[in-house]
Image (tube, rainbow, N blue to C red):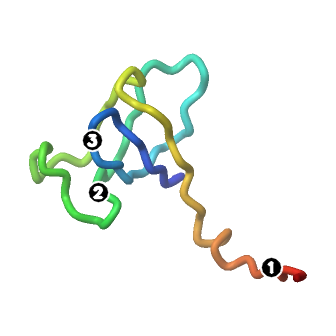
Amino acid sequence: MPTILIHISNEDPVLGEVDNLPTSTDTTIIVKNPRRKDGKDLPYLDANVSTVVWPFTRINFIELMPSSEEEEIITFIRE
């Protein structure tokens, strides 16, 4: 389940998980476990909400967060 960071118009970024990455024909995105980037609850959602559907008209862009396997990759930089 990919973790994404959604940048919504006039809002703080939202971190969450999606079952599948959106395609070019999608008009909405379904996000599970939505939260702020620091892990805190979103103030405009009820405490028991676990899934949210946002229309793409409200979204500026989406970042794909690295998985735990990608974070463990060690690279060497030649200076």
Q: Position of residue 9 (x, y in %)?
A: 33, 33
Horizontally, is 3 left or right of 7 in the view? Answer: right
Query: What's the residue at 19%, 58% (across, down)?
Result: 41
Q: Marks 2/1: CA distance?
A: 30 Å
Q: Nearer the viewer, mark 3 or mark 2?
A: 3
Q: Nearer the viewer, mark 3 or mark 1?
A: 3
Query: What's the residue at 28%, 55% (across, down)?
Result: 35
Horizontally, is 55 left or right of 45 in the view? Answer: right
Q: Position of residue 76 (x, y in %)?
A: 84, 82
- Identify which residue, 32 or 11, lies in the foreground: 11
Q: Position of residue 12 (x, y in %)?
A: 29, 48
Q: Which residue is mark 1?
A: 75
Horizontally, is 59 left or right of 11 in the view? Answer: right
Amino acid at circle 1: Thr
Query: What's the residue at 34%, 60% (across, down)?
Result: 37
Query: Is there a contact, CB below 8 Å, between mark 3 and mark 1?
Result: no
Q: Which residue is mark 2?
A: 36
- Identify which residue, 10 or 40, lies in the foreground: 10
Quadrant where the C terminus lies?
bottom right
Q: Which residue is mark 3?
A: 11
Q: Marks 3/2: CA distance?
A: 10 Å
Q: Is residue 27 above or below residue 51?
A: above
Query: What's the residue at 48%, 50% (across, down)?
Result: 4
Amino acid at circle 3: Glu
Residue at the outermost front position: 79
Q: Earlier in the sequence, mark 3 or mark 1?
A: 3
Amino acid at circle 2: Arg
Q: Position of residue 25 (x, y in %)?
A: 57, 17
**Secondary structure found at label 1:** loop
Q: Earlier in the sequence, mark 3 or mark 2?
A: 3
